[in-house]
Amino acid sequence: MGMYVLYVLLGWDPKFNLIQVCHSVARSLGLSSVEYMLDALVFYTVFLSIWEIGKQLFAANKIDKRLAVYRHEQLTQEINRKYNEGNQDFTVISCLAPIAVTMGFLNPKIILSTGSVQSSGYK
């Protein structure tokens, strides 16, 4: 779909595009209105995908800011040093409940609570 959008908007000519094949079949059957519906469907799908990705990135940024308030710096640094050679892929938050989640698409992180770290027998 992305290739077809580039084809329509920028004139980029891919070697093979399934949507172009569908267009030629619709034309050969005399259903030219189907071409417009297919174009609308493709553009709607691409727009909706971009919109949803944007919403997810915004929500991830928002929750990351909220979790920063509860960040336990000492445990975060210790666990990253011990298990991840100093990279900042682990974040420990102050919470007695055992919580372990992953978060992020472009820059994934593992979020652990102090409750899960203590119940695992760390230290």
Image (tube, rainbow, N blue to C red):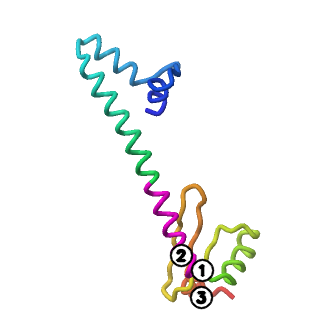
Query: What residue would you read off at disc 2?
Result: 67
Residue 71 - label? 1
Q: Quadrant of residue 118?
A: bottom right
User: Which residue type does callout 1 highlight?
Assistant: Arg
Above or below, 65 against 5 in this view is: below
State which tag comes first along the sequence, 1 or 3.
1
Q: In this view, does 21 lie above or below 100?
A: above
Residues at marks 2 and 3, CA–CA distance in whole angstroms: 19 Å
Residue denoted by label 3: 118
Tag count: 3
Q: Distance between the residues labelled 1 and 3?
A: 15 Å
Mark 1 touches mark 2? (CB < 8 Å): yes
Q: In this view, does 26 lie above or below 61?
A: above
Q: Position of residue 7 (x, y in %)?
A: 48, 24
Q: In the rendered view, would you say 120 is above or below 40?
A: below
- Residue 73 shown left or right of residue 10 in the figure: right
Few, some or many residues within 10 Å of mark 1 (<14, 14–19, 20+): some
Quadrant the C terminus occupies: bottom right
Write down the region rendered in magenta: 55-70
For the point 75% across and 74% down, the residue is 81
Residue type of the residue flagged with mark 2: Leu
Q: Is mark 2 on a helix, strand or loop?
A: helix
Helix or strand or loop: what does disc 1 sit on?
Answer: loop
Helix, strand or loop at label 3? It is: helix
Residue 47 on image: x %, y %: 40, 41
Q: In which quadrant is the N terminus drawn?
A: top left
